[in-house]
Image: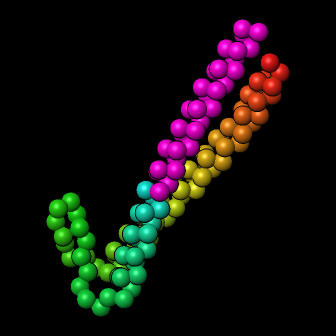
Amino acid sequence: MDDMNKETEQKIGQLQLMEQNLQNFNMQKQTFQTQLFEIDNALKELENTKEKTYKIVGTVMIASKKEDLIKELKEKKSVIELRIKSLEKQEKVIKEKSSQMQTEIMSKLKKK
């Protein structure tokens, strides 16, 4: 019976770690989604502008070709979208494991 309690406690600890991981994934995903939003807004502005375009590099603003900025922003957008997809896949795996572990813990607790 004592081994069963230790095993259940370990599983509860693992479950808590999974929940923390999910929270971290959500924070990362929100950060990336905010960056995507900013990139989309910048792309819209670039499409509508006829004026000279600029890019901020560190603390300096430098003139850039509109086409180069659009290309750079689209590349950044693509990378961020891939990161979000990766996080979502990891989230899905952890949610499935978490659900399975919750079921196991509940069944062991009911047997007591």
Magenta highlight on residue 37 = no
Would you say the magenta stretch is mainly helix, strand or loop?
Answer: helix
Question: In this picture, which residue range is highlighted in magenta?
Answer: 1-30
Magenta highlight on residue 26 = yes
- Residue 1's place in the image compared with 93, above or below, is above
Say which of 24 and 4 sits in front. Answer: 4
- The residue at 45%/66% (across/down) is 36
- Residue 95 appears at what percent x and percent y? 66, 43
Q: Quadrant of residue 66?
A: bottom left
- Residue 9 appears at what percent x and percent y? 65, 20
- Residue 96 appears at what percent x and percent y? 71, 42
- The residue at 44%/69% (across/down) is 37
Judged left or right of residue 61, residue 44 is right
Say which of 76 and 34 sits in front. Answer: 34
- Residue 46 appears at what percent x and percent y? 35, 82
Say which of 40 and 78 sits in front. Answer: 40
Outermost residue toward the right? 111
Outermost residue toward the top? 2
